[in-house]
Amino acid sequence: METYAERLESSLSKQIRVELTERDMDQADLARGIGIEPATLNRYIKGHRSMPLPTFFKVAETLAVSPHILLQRAEARVSE
């Protein structure tokens, strides 16, 4: 059984994809914006690696959404 943290991490990945779509961006755009390799970002989004907190803050900044709101939106997906 998945833990709450695992479900939240998965929901955060989904929410990041939604935010990208809403901004007509792709993962390569986001990776450039936060200064990491696209393959690294892809591993975070696919759940192969956990996203470090500093990277999460850069993601939120690049998407022009507060980290709190991004996490809140992801948390709302946990129960879906």
Image: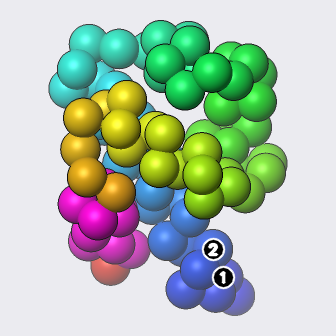
Main SS of the magenta part reads helix
Residue plotted at (47% across, 49% down): 57
Image-based side of 17 in relation to 27, left or right? left
From the viewer's perspective, is residue 3 above or below residue 7? below
Left or right of 75 on screen, residue 46: right
Give the magenta range: 68-78
Q: Examine the rendering and report whether any part of residue 42 can be seen.
A: no
Give, as a three-letter code, the residue at label 1. Answer: Glu
Using a 10 Å C-alpha cutoff, classify the residue at mark 2 as few (fewer than 14 neighbours), some (14 to 19) or many (20 or more). some
Secondary structure at badge 1 equals loop
Residue 16 coordinates in the image, percent (x, y): 40, 41
Q: Nearer the viewer, residue 45 or 37?
A: 37
Badge 1 local density, few (<14 within 10 Å), some, or many (20+)?
few
Quadrant of the snapshot with the N terminus? bottom right
Q: Residue at x 34, y 57 (%)?
A: 67
Whether residue 72 appears in magenta in the rendering, the answer is yes
> Is residue 10 rendered to the left or right of residue 20?
right
Q: Is residue 70 visible?
A: yes
- The answer to whether residue 53 is magenta is no
Spot occupied by residue 28 in the image (x, y as percentages of width and height): 56, 12
Q: Of the residues shown, which amino acid type is indicated by label 2?
A: Glu
Q: Is residue 51 above or below residue 62?
A: below
* CB atoms of marks 2 and 1 within 8 Å: yes
- Spatial CA distance of label 2 from label 1 is 6 Å
Q: Which residue is mark 1?
A: 2
Quadrant for residue 52, please give it: bottom right
Q: Is residue 9 left or right of residue 15?
A: right
Residue at image coords 29%, 65%: 68
Q: Which residue is mark 2?
A: 6
The residue that appears at 66% across and 31% down in the rendered structure is: 41
Which mark, residue 12?
none
Q: Quarter of the image containing the C terminus?
A: bottom left
